[in-house]
Image (tube, rainbow, N blue to C red):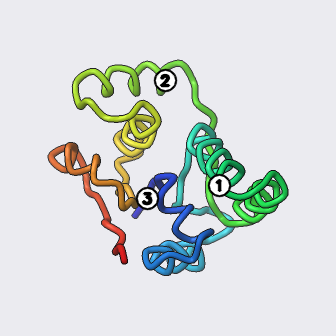
Amino acid sequence: MAWVLDSLALLAVLQGEVGGSRVKELIDAADSRAPDLNLTVINLGEVIYNVERRRSRVDAVEAQGLILSWPINILDVDSRLALEAARLKVVRRMGYLDCFVLALALQLDATVVTGDPDFHRVEDLLQVEWLPSA
């Protein structure tokens, strides 16, 4: 089974939130030689942006190093994925960065891991693993 991580999933781990324990389980279970956890570089940037904005540049650099050490496929965004994200934004009326998660999950036939309620809008398209919240 393949998963696509939303930025909220990674932030849950980094911030020690309730849902972070499930994401950590997925990370710990991933095979470093062929991980089935996926993330776009756009959404990685979103995570690092949020850490720096909420905490500090030092914390953001540390978080980036930690994420890069985990067995997660960090995928570049090509024009096909970017244009699909744009199309999905129009038809599903979600945040543009969330649409990269959605487009990648559809491309990989993967489950989205998130706590973001906007993904209720796309449960008819794919599987969503909902992270518990406090």
- Is tag 1's residue or tag 3's residue first in the polypeptide sequence? 3
Callout in the foreground (2, 1): 1
- Is tag 2's residue or tag 1's residue first in the polypeptide sequence? 1
- Give how far across and how far down residue 48 sits, in percent: 68, 49
Asked whether disc 1 touches disc 3, contact meaning CB atoms under 8 Å apart, the reply is no
Asked whether disc 2 touches disc 1, contact meaning CB atoms under 8 Å apart, the reply is no
- Give how far across and how far down residue 118 sits, in percent: 28, 46
Q: Is residue 134 above or below residue 84?
A: below
Q: Which residue is mark 2?
A: 82
Image quadrant in which you'd find residue 1: bottom left
Residue shown at 31% from the left, 27% from the top: 88
**Residue 3 - label:** 3
Relative placement, left or right, of 22 versus 75 is left
**Residue 54 - label:** 1
The secondary element bearing badge 2 is classed as helix
- Give how far across and how far down residue 43 sits, in percent: 56, 43
- Is tag 3's residue or tag 2's residue first in the polypeptide sequence? 3
Q: Amino acid at mark 1?
A: Arg
Q: Quadrant of the C terminus?
A: bottom left
Q: Amino acid at mark 2?
A: Ala
Image quadrant in which you'd find residue 78: top right
